[in-house]
Amino acid sequence: MKHIFLIGCISSILLFSCSKDREIGPSTPIAPDYALPQGNAPKEANDKIQQLYDTYGSYFLYVFTQKDFEWMQSAGGSASKIDTAVLGDPAYAGDMLSFLDDIWLKFLPDDFKKEQGIPYRVLMADTIKQYRTGYPPGREYLYFDFKVVGKSITFAGMNASLRTMTPAQKVEKKNILTAAIWNYYISNNILDIPAEFYTVSNYTAAAPATPLNAANPANVEAYRQKGFLPSSYNAVSGAPFEWHNGAYSWSTAKSNDVNSYILNITQRTDAQLQPYLVYPLIKEKFDILVNYYKTKYRIDVRAIANATY
């Protein structure tokens, strides 16, 4: 009897459900996050922004709010830091798009750009500045070339400087922004590091004696023989800075090591790297990364590093 009663209940429910079926109304269209074209940039620039969105699903914006730029303001005392983006003159939107293409987009294959190679929002600003309390007039702001927040990157420099930039200044700016872009890729797992890279150097061996500088060539030589590159270079003199100068940095040797290689393979020219590539372990790790990004992602990192203007 329980089975008969249960079957009867199910039949009644199904009959009732069918009798109450209603037609589903038309779907409500979802409005886009931003309306294009945005403003009075030259038509060619607005058309390019539309084409970038249509092809890659990424917004290149020159009109945006502080909320777009920095999703959350952090609360703090009088010493808290607040970043602000100053909008650029729309007349330079085309120049900024051309600059970003020259130093970034043209080096990426289309499939990579369609996936995650271009952030959802690319904001183009005149200036990115950070207010500091307690500083005298004229020194109360720090200025930055970029800011990364989530799936958004803001680039500063959409102004008249784009039309007067020397080739050397363009290379310098390219290297600064390349570092930011590749850090974004690696930290968001858009690009990865091959496991093979970490099998070359011995990270558990005792670190070379410190300090590592030109006054201690034997120490530097030992460091190179272990397969390690400088982590940065003086912007004026070009003097290298070694990431290992203490026990703590050696405890994070793997991340320090790969960060130094990413910098060198994407920013240093063949001529600049030649003195380092005579070391077998450095050459082996260099080849692993260069070939990996070319094979897996079809990105020629050496074309990025060697680009001149």
Image: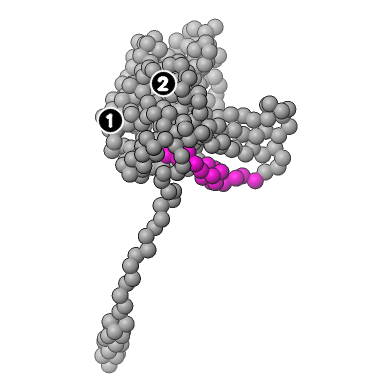
Q: Is mark 2 on a helix, strand or loop?
A: helix
Q: Position of residue 277 (x, y in %)?
A: 36, 13
**Residue at the outermost bottom position:** 1
Quadrant in which the N terminus is drawn:
bottom left
The magenta region covers 60-75
Q: Residues under labels 1 and 2: Cα distance?
A: 18 Å
Find residue 267 and name its label.
2
Q: In which quarter of the image is residue 247?
A: top right
Q: Position of residue 73 (x, y in %)?
A: 60, 45
Q: Is mark 1 on a helix, strand or loop?
A: loop
Name the amino acid, label 1.
Arg
Q: How crowded is mark 2: few (under 14 residues within 10 Å), some or many (20 or more)?
A: many
Q: Does the magenta stretch include residue 68?
A: yes
Quick check: 66 above or below 274?
below
Judged by its main secondary structure, the magenta piece is loop
* Residue 149 in view in this figure: yes
Which of marks 2 and 1 precedes in the sequence?
A: 2
Front residue of this view, candidates 198 and 131: 131
Front residue of this view, candidates 277 and 246: 277
Q: Position of residue 77 (x, y in %)?
A: 70, 42
Determine the residue positioned at 33% across, 71% down. Answer: 25
Find residue 121 and name its label.
none
Front residue of this view, candidates 281 and 21: 21
Q: Position of residue 115 (x, y in %)?
A: 33, 41
Name the amino acid, label 2.
Gln
Determine the residue positioned at 55% across, 14% down. Answer: 211
On the picture, is 76 further left or further right than 175?
right
Determine the residue positioned at 62% across, 29% down. Answer: 142
